[in-house]
Image (spheres, helix red, strand yellow):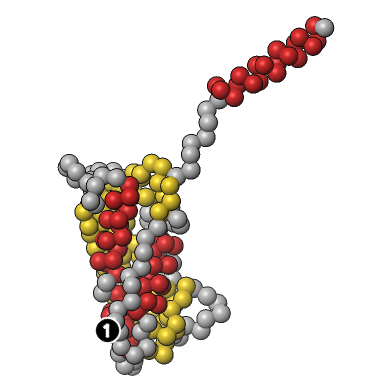
Amino acid sequence: MTARILLTALLLACTSCGDILPHPPPPPALYRLTPLPGSASTGPALAIQLVADAPTAPAALDTARIALTTSTYSFDYFANAAWTDRAPAMLQTLIVETLENDARIRVVARSSLELRADAVLQSDMRDFEAEYRGEGPPTVRVRFDCRLVRLPERNVIAVRQFEGSARAGANQTAAIVAGFDEALHAALAPMPDWVSASLGAPKTQ
């Protein structure tokens, strides 16, 4: 009888533990950005196969978390929100899709051993964060450096920095993500012309 009472007491104690132990936080809301749509003024396609490597990034940006800054020396992330992929991988996808939509390069792909590439687009992510300065919504800043490398010579044929900024419409996550999209589009806008002009130029000896 005593053993039965003790067992019952233990079961009741374990049941009540469920209300005391902390519950895991809810998963973050996931957000993605969009590539530039195709332009109606594109020229003929170049018979070139281009590989877009995954951008390099500092450790603070090499994450799926959405970055923010409040001063020159601080770095943080939005709570309960994340990108659908690590920021450099997401940027790689958007660069590929933007160039595919432009349709002036015959083949654009991510790094692949199966693709015999004529050129490689390398990039370094410099800024990809929402910047708070003073009152109101943040300003989103996107900046990355690119190099076009012709293969098999591995000659760098063009170098350019791409950047864009946009003020978020409100201090809310969805509005800030829309600001990221606007800033990214501003950064990507000159890329198709630059890539096509650089790869279409005659080879130099």
Mark 1: which amino acid? Ser
Residue visible at 40% across and 72% down in the picture? 97
Crowding at dot 1, Cα within 10 Å, few <14 / some 14-19 / many 20+, comes out as few
Picture residue at 24% right of the left edge, 47% below the top: 170
Quarter of the figure with the C terminus? bottom left
Please say if 189 is above or below 71: below
- Secondary structure state at the residue bearing disc 1: loop
Q: Position of residue 75 (x, y in %)?
A: 31, 45
For residue 181, what is the image quadrant?
bottom left
Residue with the most extreme right position:
1
Q: How many numbered tags mark residues here?
A: 1
Q: Of all residues shown, which one is farthest toward the top? A: 2
Identify whether 78 is placed above or below 129: above
Q: Residue at coordinates 56% horizontally, 79% vertically from top-left? A: 114
65 shown above or below 54: above
- Position of residue 194 measured from the top left corner of the image (x, y, whole percent): 28, 79
Determine which quarter of the picture holds residue 44.
bottom left
Residue shown at 52% from the left, 81% from the top:
115
* 33 with respect to 9 (left or right): left
Which quadrant of the figure contains the N terminus? top right
Q: Is residue 193 visible?
A: yes
Q: Is residue 104 left or right of residue 138?
A: right
Q: Name the residue tied to disc 1.
A: 41
Decide if residue 41 is on the left or right side of residue 89.
Answer: left
